[in-house]
Structures are given as structure tokens and as C-alpha cells.
Image (cartoon, rainbow, N blue to C red):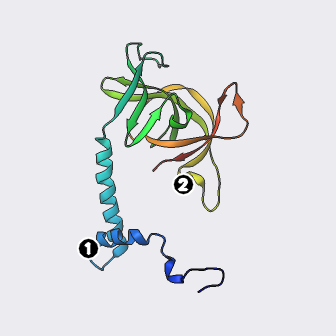
Amino acid sequence: MLKGIDRPLDNFSVFPFESYLRIIKRHLRSPNHPLEQLLNRLVEHSSISNSHVQDRNIILQQKHASGPLVDGMSKSTEQYKKLIFNEYIVCVSSLKDSALFFPNQTVVLARNIVKMNDKIYVVGNKFSNYQDLFYSPCNSSHLGIFKLQGLYTLSAFNLEGARKCVLIPYGKHCKGNSRTDYNICEII
């Protein structure tokens, strides 16, 4: 027994991913080059998962006709307030559920969801200023965490490759009732 710990040392795991060890071992096919094999299996699994994500079922809900549109979209374009994809919900009427992270490191605040020519677009404002939230032990941008400020004018963004992110308002920076300063964290 250790001083200050009232349980046997055997009850503590020194390997935090011990339960994941079984899965890691299953990915290894021979004792040679285990790290390479593990990386190859994870890449294979990721490519299978990503191809499945491309074929994901997208559910559009809460049809309406009052959202903002950009040039090239008519009032007869199908508009929705809620989008369900990849087990996540994007809802334009809720600030906490309205942020999307795109592959080119663009964060968009969704204002409308549009279906046009069998493609789904998010009409929203892209953030104009991205900064690291912290720099130690690494830059937060490497982890998909940013401090965001300012919004560009409305644009349409193809949903391809978009991921949900958490939007957290910070500070006392308000313009009227709408905040323009946020922290975001990408949902993996």
C-alpha cells in the first residue's frame, strides 16, 4: 500500500488505454514492425469509415421559406432549419448547434440549410479571424481549437467534408444581441 492511497496498487492502471490494448493487438498480424502495421490498419479503417461517411444519410427537418439566401438562390429553393448527419445535429436556430468545421480549416456559423439541385448547402457566415487559444504544450490549432473573431458576409458552403464543432461565446464582446467572439472545438 502507498501512503495516502487506501487501495492496493494493483487496482490502478498504468496504461490509460488498457481496455483498447485488445483492439490494438487484433490489428497486428505478425510480430515484425508493429507500429507500421498498426498505422496501416488504422488508415485502412479510417478510409473505410470515410467512404461510409460520404454515403451517409442526411436528414433535413423543419422546412421553412424565411431564411437568408445568397445570389443564385431563389425563394423557391428548399430551405430547412435542421440537418442531421453522421449522428450530429446542425440547427440554425440554436447558436450551440450552428457551427461547422470544413476541411480547409474554415469555420462557418450556419444561418440556413438549403437543398438545391440534389446538393445540400449551408448558408452562413465564415469567421474572418482565427487565432490559437493556447500555445503550450502545443498550438491549439493542431487540435482543432481556435479563438474566432469577426464574421464575413453570407456565403453558401457545400456540405462535403463538413464536421460539427462546438461554439463557445467568450468575453463581453457583443454587438447588439449577437456575439461575434467565440472559441471553437472540433468534434471528432
Q: Residue at horizontal 50%, vertical 78%? A: 11
Q: Nearer the viewer, mark 2 or mark 1?
A: 1
Instruction: Determine the secondary structure under disc 2.
Output: helix
167 shown above or below 115: below
Q: Residue at horizontal 29%, vertical 46%? A: 52
Mark 2 belongs to which amino acid?
His
52 shown above or below 33: above
**In which quadrant of the rendered view does residue 1 lie?**
bottom right
Q: Which residue is mark 1?
A: 29
181 shown above or below 24: above
Numbered badge on residue 71: none
Q: Position of residue 61 (x, y in %)?
A: 38, 27
Q: Residue at horizontal 48%, vertical 74%? A: 15
Q: Residue at horizontal 51%, vertical 36%? A: 97
- Label 2–label 1 contact, CB within 8 A: no
Neighbourhood count class around disc 1 (C-alpha, 10 Å): few under 14, some 14–19, many 20 upward: few
User: In the drawing, does residue 4 fall left or right of residue 55?
Assistant: right
Any part of residue 158 in sight = no
**In which quadrant of the rendered view does residue 41 lie?**
bottom left
Q: Position of residue 32 (x, y in %)?
A: 30, 79
Q: Which residue is mark 2?
A: 142
